[in-house]
C-alpha cells in the first residue's frame, strides 16, 4: 500500500513538474500508437465496410480469420514482425529505406498496426451490418453508386466506427510484448511507457514504475471514457 501511495504521489509530481524524461516517453508512446492507429484505420475501415456490405465466396473464411486476428497474442505478432524485418527475413534482405529496420519506431509502428487492424476492421464490419438494410435499398433506388452507398452507411454507423478506432487505440497503447521484441527498449529511441514500466520494475524502482503505470492508466481511461460517451450518445439517439 505504501508503494502504491508513493507511486501516485510521484506520478503527480512528475506530471506537474513536466519531467523531460517522462514527457519524452509519453510523447514517443503517443506518436508510435497514433501513427499505427492511423494506418490501421485507413486500411481497416474500408475492409470492414466491404465485408459488412458485400457477399462473396470465401467471406466466412475471411471473417473467421479476422476474428482470429482480433484475439491474436501481441507477442506472436512481434515475433512475426521481428522475423520478416531481420537481416535474414524476406523484407530485411531488401534493405530498402521504405522498410523499417528492427529496433526503430518504424518497426514498432508496423507491429502495432498489425495488432490494431483486425479490431478496427472487425468492429467496423459489425457496425455496418447493424445498419437497417432498407437504408441501403433506398439509397441505391435514388441512383447512388456503390461508393456513395458505402459512405452513407458508414455515416449511419459512425458511432460504431469511432468506437472501433478507440478500441484499436486501447489495444496498442497498453501493449508490451511486441514493442519489446521489435523496439528493444532503447533509451531515447524506442522506450515507451509499457517497456519503461518493465525496466523500472526489474531495477526495483517501483515508485517510478507505478508513476508511469498511472500515466498509462490515465491514457487508457481517457480512451475508454470517450468510447462510453459515444455509446451513451448512440443509446440516447
Image (cartoon, rainbow, N blue to C red):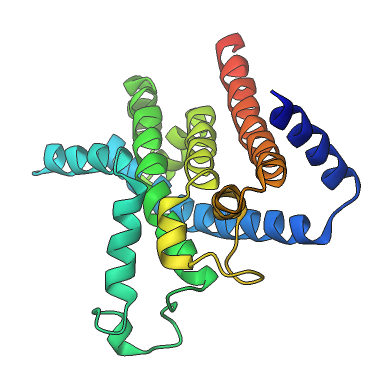
Nearest to the observer: residue 175 or residue 146:
175
From the viewer's perspective, is residue 46 above or below residue 122? below
From the viewer's perspective, is residue 126 above or below residue 24? above
Residue occupying the far right of the picture:
17
Q: Is residue 29 left or right of residue 49?
A: right
Residue for point 69% across, 35% down: 218
Nearest to the observer: residue 24 or residue 229:
24
Q: Is residue 200 visible?
A: yes
Percent from the top left, x then y, of residue 219? Answer: 66, 39
Q: Is residue 142 left or right of residue 222?
A: left
Residue 59, image quadrant: top left
Residue 195, image quadrant: bottom right
Nearest to the observer: residue 131 or residue 164:
164
Percent from the top left, x then y, of residue 76? Answer: 29, 53
From the viewer's perspective, is residue 107 above or below residue 137? below
Q: Is residue 144 visible?
A: no
Residue for point 67% across, 70% down: 188
From the viewer's perspective, is residue 89 above or below residue 204? below
Q: Is residue 49 left or right of residue 154?
A: left
Residue for point 36% across, 89% down: 95
Amino acid at each position: 500500500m505504501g508503494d502504491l501511495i508513493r507511486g501516485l504521489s510521484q506520478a503527480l509530481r512528475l506530471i506537474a513538474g513536466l519531467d523531460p524524461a517522462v514527457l519524452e516517453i509519453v510523447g514517443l508512446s503517443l506518436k508510435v500508437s497514433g501513427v499505427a492507429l492511423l494506418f490501421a484505420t485507413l486500411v481497416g475501415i474500408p475492409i470492414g465496410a466491404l465485408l459488412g456490405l458485400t457477399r462473396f465466396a470465401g467471406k466466412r473464411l475471411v471473417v473467421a480469420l479476422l476474428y482470429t486476428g482480433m484475439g491474436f497474442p501481441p507477442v506472436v505478432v512481434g515475433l512475426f514482425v521481428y522475423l520478416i524485418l531481420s537481416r535474414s527475413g524476406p523484407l530485411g534482405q531488401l534493405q530498402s529505406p521504405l522498410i523499417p529496420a528492427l529496433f526503430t519506431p518504424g518497426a514498432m509502428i508496423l507491429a502495432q498496426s498489425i495488432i490494431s487492424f483486425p479490431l478496427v476492421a472487425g468492429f467496423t464490419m459489425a457496425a455496418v451490418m447493424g445498419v437497417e438494410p432498407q437504408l441501403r435499398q433506398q439509397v441505391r433506388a435514388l441512383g447512388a453508386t456503390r461508393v456513395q452507398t458505402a459512405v452513407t452507411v458508414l455515416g449511419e454507423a459512425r458511432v460504431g466506427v469511432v468506437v472501433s478506432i478507440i478500441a484499436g487505440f486501447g489495444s496498442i497503447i497498453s501493449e508490451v510484448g511486441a514493442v519489446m521484441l521489435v523496439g528493444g527498449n532503447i533509451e531515447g529511441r524506442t522506450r515507451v511507457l509499457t517497456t519503461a514500466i518493465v525496466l523500472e520494475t526489474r531495477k526495483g524502482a517501483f515508485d517510478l514504475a507505478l508513476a508511469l503505470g498511472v500515466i498509462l492508466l490515465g491514457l487508457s481511461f481517457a480512451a475508454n471514457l470517450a468510447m462510453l460517451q459515444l455509446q451513451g450518445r448512440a443509446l440516447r439517439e
